Amino acid sequence: MFIASAAHILVETEEACQDLKEQIEGGLDFAAAAAEFSACPSGAQGGALGEFSPGQMVPEFDQVVFNDEVGVVHGPVKTQFGYHLIIISSREQQREASARHILVETEEACQDLKEQIEGGLDFAAAAAEFSACPSGAQGGALGSFGPGRMVPEFDKVVFNDEVGVVHGPVKTQFGFHLIEITSRDD
């Protein structure tokens, strides 16, 4: 999955947008122009929108941000909100992983389950029977996620340790986990 960072200026007319673009290309600072002319509240931050993924913005905006050149002013781009000038600050592929886990209250219970799984107990069956997390009903499956979506101790295992191995006990604020990384794009 991609993640991008961009800034924009929103105005009512295509003519105003084109005029601002020419001024910016002539030396007017993009952030200063956003602060002065943008109809979007982000103008107060120089038009900065922070980081976002595909689908978080309207399709016309996403089309530019996730396909066009980084570091240049794009536009006018017409959306339901008006006309935008967009400058893409960064765009990168974000790492993703899939994992499943079993959450229990004690380290001893976690270690005992790990030994049973290593001895042949099915991970999904163990999650369904013993996990305190609602994901237990799906065999502990958590789906795909990127860094920062789980608590730090969980993320550290999922994004650094070996795929296809049962890791743990891993202590978090929720209890003790057994974690199996089912896939990861490195």
Image (tube, rainbow, N blue to C red):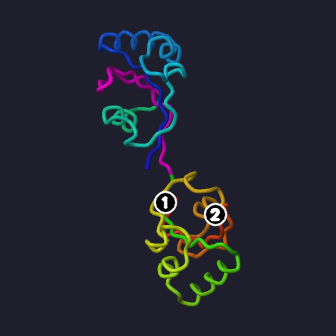
Element at label 1: loop
Mark 1 vs mark 2: which is more N-terminal? 2
Range covered by the magenta-colored residues: 71-94
Q: Residues within 10 Å of mark 1 (few under 14, many from 20)?
A: few
Which residue appears farthest toward the bottom when viewing the image?
119
Left of 42 or right of it: where is 166? right
Identify the residue under disc 2: 174
Circle number at residue 185: 1
Horizontal and vertical percent position of residue 123: 51, 80
Left of 152 or right of it: where is 55? left
Which tag is nearer the camera, tag 1 or tag 2? 2
Quadrant in the picture for residue 62:
top left
Horizontal and vertical percent position of residue 16: 34, 10
Q: At 52% across and 81% down in the image, what residue appears?
A: 126
Cα separation, mark 1 vs mark 2, equals 27 Å
Quadrant in the picture for residue 137:
bottom left
In the rendered image, the vertical position of residue 140 relative to residue 8, given as above or below? below
